[in-house]
Image: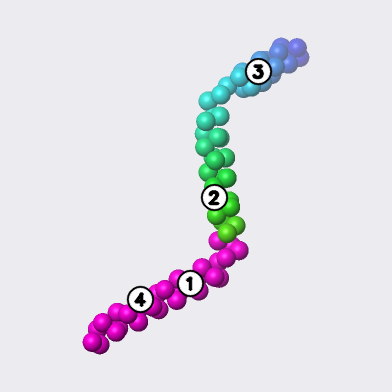
Amino acid sequence: MRSILRRGKGLLGRLHRDDRGAEGLEKLLILAAVVLPLLGLLIFFGKDIVEWVRDALDDVKGESEDLRNS
């Protein structure tokens, strides 16, 4: 039983000292810090953004029809 506890303690110690995954985790946290606020803005202003894009597209279509008719 003691040998199992010693091996477990040694494994936990090695796991605690291992920094190989820290850089990847830091990158993931930075990405989440950028993406989550943007996602919140898109959810909150989604309808306004869709309306703005539709209006801009209608303006472009109207201008192209005006150029075609003249």
CA distance for labels 4 and 2? 30 Å
Q: What amino acid does circle 1 point to?
A: Trp
Decide: marks 4, 2 in contact (CB < 8 A)? no
Q: Residue 19: image x %, image y %?
A: 56, 24
| Residue on which disc 1 sits | 52
Decide: marks 4, 1 in contact (CB < 8 A)? no
| Of callouts 2 and 3, the N-terminal one | 3
Q: Residue at x 40, y 78 (%)?
A: 58
Q: Residue 63: image x %, image y %?
A: 32, 80
Q: Which residues are magenta?
A: 42-70
Category of crowding for the residue at label 1, using alpha-carbon neighbours closer than 10 angstroms: few (below 14), some (14–19), many (at least 20): few
Decide: marks 2, 3 in contact (CB < 8 A)? no
Looking at the rendered image, the quarter that the C terminus falls into is bottom left
| Residue on which disc 4 sits | 60
CA distance for labels 3 and 1? 56 Å
- Residue 11 visible in rendering: no
| Of callouts 4 and 2, the N-terminal one | 2
CA distance for labels 1 and 2? 22 Å
Decide: marks 3, 4 in contact (CB < 8 A)? no
| Residue on which disc 2 sits | 35
CA distance for labels 3 and 4? 64 Å
